Amino acid sequence: MQNHSDRDVVSPSHSTNQIQQDIGKNSGQAISQMIGGMAIGQLTVYLSQVQTQLETPPTPANKLGANPYQGLLAFRETDGDRFFGRDKQIEQLWQRFRDLHEQKSAVRMLPIYGPSGSGKSSLVLAGLIPKLGAQPLPGRNQARLVVLVPGTHPVEALAAMLARIATNDPTPVSKTRELTQEIIQQNNHQEYDGLRRIADVFPDIALSPLIVLVDQFEEVYTLCKDKAERDAFVGNLLCAAAEQSKRVSVILTLRSDFLGETQQHPCLNKLFSEQGFLVPIMQPEDLEAAIVRPSAQAGYQLNSAVVQLLVEQTQGREALPLLQFALTRIWEGLQNNIEPAETLENLGGVGGALAGEAQRLYKSLNVEDQAIARRIFLALVQIEEGTKNIRRRAALSELIADDKEATTVRAIINLFAAPGVRFLATFSDEQSGEMIEVAHEAMIRNWGQLQEWLTECQENLRKKRKIEQAAEDWVDQDKSQEYVLQGRSLRDAREFMQGQKVYRETALSSLAKEFVIASWRRQRRGIFKLIALFAIFPIIGTLTIVHFSILGWTESILARRDCHPTPILKGLLEYMNNSGYKNNFSNIYLCHKNLNDIKLTNTIFEKATFKDAELNRARFDNSNLVGANFTNASLVGANLQKAILWNADLQDANLESANLEGSDLESANFKNTKLKNAILKNVNLNNVIGLDEQQIREALICGIKLPQNLAEISKKIENRDCKILRNY
């Protein structure tokens, strides 16, 4: 049977009409609609999301019938009768699942993994599920199966599916909240047994056990940022699957890129190692079946030379979705009397079909719409460190930066989601409403234009996602004032929002803009309340206004990322610090500033930039200066006692007579630093960079540890100036 995508769209579901249409199309399968789900043979299947598709245009008169290929869309639960090339793997999966149920002490969890494009989801959805429907496990003539994707809140996703079974209600919001609380609780043995307890009270659970299919399990690690929720979700699956009553079993599909992430849960990692199923690449005969049998079933016999060419261009690559896309275009060509070989040549082969069509659609837009299309696709990619970028689902509202462009955004999405291409998939989620995603990660990897955009906008995308996530948390908490941005986070968000007037491709959604504005208004309201409070006391009120004016003025100066001298800044910084308003100045730019004699003890300056600054006699004792840049700065007579200077860059700085007693200098850079009469007492210089013998001879030292390159003189001079330093 054909296998083509590891969940090329999220768990597909159907409205009542869609299910009825699928029944008509899949006469070879026993599929029927049921309250709250659908029946596939002896299996009752509950789906977490409702896929929405554009109307398929009518087939031209006297032409071939409906296209039997999937394009970039995944094979679904109702597609078993046209899913070819995976018979052997389907049988192997069924037997493994059966064996897990027959072993008394086994954990009934079947992990299925493979690279992107290997067809994990299609194999399970259109292969294993129909197989379980047609051939139930021994002693289990009936079963209930829920299909879900974890998303950002996997516990809620699981609770919603269980609530749907319990209530026969497609949107059981109240019950979902109730079951969520049960799932996140631990029992007296510190086990997450909520799923097991809930399943145990389902009617006829002994005769109709529960199977939980978690598709795209990697989202537990890529989208869920709450470790406690992640642990609760995994813990519930493991606990229920290990229960000897055999009432719950679990199937997982995971991209093999994320196998390492399972080490966060050792028991889960062990199951992947001991009973996981690696989806193999399709052999030539399997690919041939996947190519030939759907078209033959639809009434056309493909030429053997074309079939062989398609097999050669697909074999050994993560190219199953590309193959399906090419076959879709070949079928469309046949409907217009174009020979398959000609269509394949025009496409540029299996690899060129997708990228060429995507670029053609993009170029068909005007300049303004191209900018919107660029923004849409960038929003649908999850930037990953150290791994391939992956697709992400986004609410339609997130893609609309301005209400005026809502119609245009929908039109562009429809263009790329049209039946002939289906680069985008749209679906409804009971919690988030209308959602959009790239139909398959093959789109991300193979469309060169999108790769260029991602390279150009990577940093802005990270900033945008951070603000968007904070906005979503704010909404989840009913727009509570406790979840608005404050301080530097608010300042950075406002700067980013202003900058997007230029960089429209990473513009914030209307919701995120509302969030930033609400945060700013709350900050202003706080100031105005204080002003009003002291309005009856003229002197105090005036001082309060002056106080907040000074703070606001200082914040505006610090927000500038320039290196121009600002003479008044020294006093402003000291005022802000001494008033107790702020002692964290991480990442600020103080290059070229005149800050002689400034007193900022016990202050945080992580990764601050002091390049070329005047800091003579400055007080930084007990301050956090991790990663600070003091390149070419003047720190003559500065007090840096017990300061933390990990990875600080002191290259070419002047530290004459500076006091570094007890400071932490791990990996600090002292290349060409002037240390004449600098006090190096009780410091570990073992891991500093660039320190030479001449610098040590000029400094005042006592109780130090020198780096390896100065080991020969270490014993001789490590306490050389202790007598002198007693007077300091």
Image (tube, helix red, strand yellow):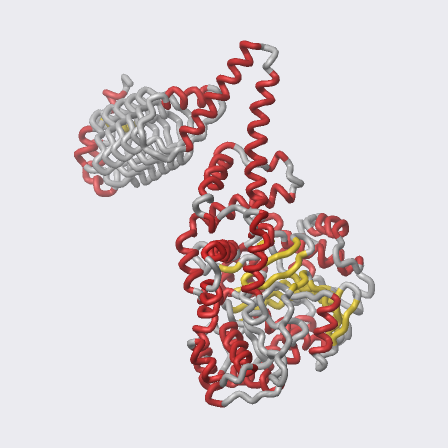
* Left-right relation of 287 to 647: right
**Residue reaching furthest right?**
203
Give the answer, above or below, for where 383 lies relative to 613: below
Q: Quadrant of residue 394?
A: bottom right
Say above or below: 138 vs 271.
below
The quarter of the rendered structure image containing the C terminus is top left
Q: Is residue 250 visible?
A: no
| Residue 450 place in picture, x, y as percent | 44, 60
Circle count: 0
| Residue closer to the observer: 685 or 214 | 214
| Along the viewing direction, whichever of 374 and 704 lies nearer the viewer | 374
| Residue 204 on image: x %, y % | 82, 65
Residue 641 appears in the rendering? yes
Residue drawn at x 66%, y 59% is 428
- The answer to which image quadrant residue 523 occupies is top right
Q: In the figure, 372 relative to 700: above or below? A: below
As drawn, is 549 to the left or to the right of 18? left
Q: Judge whether 344 appears above or below 120 on screen.
A: below
- Residue occupying image coordinates x 43% and y 29%: 556
Image coords of residue 588 (percent x, y): 39, 33
* Residue 499 location (% of width, % of height): 44, 42
Q: Is residue 146 left or right of residue 2?
A: right
> Which residue is found at the position 59% from the left and 47% from the top?
403
Q: Residue at x 64, y 74 (%)?
A: 128
Quarter of the image for the N terminus: give it. bottom right
Instruction: Please indicate whether residue 187 sits to the left or right of residue 685 in the image.
Output: right
Q: Nearer the viewer, residue 162 or 518?
A: 518
The image quadrant that residue 612 belongs to is top left
